[in-house]
Amino acid sequence: MEANQPDSEKYASLVRGIVTKIVDSPEEVEVTAVDRGRTTVVEIGVSPQDMGKVIGKAGRNIDALRSVTRAAGLVDHQRVHVELLESDEEEEDAPEDAPEQD
């Protein structure tokens, strides 16, 4: 991570570097960071086929990714949250008249 990067971009770069190594389609990985004062939200978008790999068994991969970025944020006295975005393709596959499941 470069010292002259904005903090939010440092976290996005960190997450992008980790996620692209996990997935089968690294070219489809989209990572954005939104600065909200002392909190940065890093949003991850991956292909539907790679969603399970990013989440991992029992959520271990996404939990580990959140822990690493949270620790990186502590250095800068910044709160960092990582969110995994649902892809549009998954939503298109679901029938519109199907009842929502909780």
Image: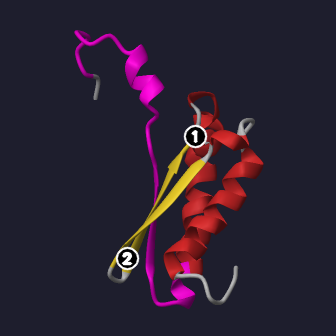
Q: Front-most of 100 and 50? A: 50
**40 above or below 65?**
below
Which secondary structure, mark 2? strand
Residue 9 in magenta stretch: no
Distance, label 2 to label 1, CA atoms, is 23 Å
> N-terminal of the two: label 2 or label 1?
2
**25 above or below 12?**
above
According to the image, what is the colour scheme of the structure?
secondary structure
Q: Position of residue 69 (x, y in %)?
A: 57, 70
Residue 92 is drawn in which quadrant?
top left
Image side of residue 22 versus residue 42, left or right: right
Q: Position of residue 83 (x, y in %)?
A: 45, 54
Which residue matches tag 1? Answer: 46
Residue 39, label in figure: 2
What are the residue bounds of the magenta stretch? Answer: 73-100
Image side of residue 2 versus residue 39, left or right: right
Q: Position of residue 86 (x, y in %)?
A: 44, 37
Image point 58% across, 36% down: which residue?
A: 51
Image point 23% across, 15% down: which residue?
A: 99
Split into 4 quadrants, where in the image is the N terminus?
A: bottom right
The kind of residue on which mark 2 rests is: Thr
Split into 4 quadrants, where in the image is the C terminus?
A: top left
Residue 102, label in figure: none
Residue 67 is drawn in which quadrant?
bottom right
Answer few, some or many: residues within 10 Å of disc 1's Cα (few below 14, many 20 plus, some between 14 and 19): many
**CB-based contact (under 8 Å), mark 2 and mark 1:** no
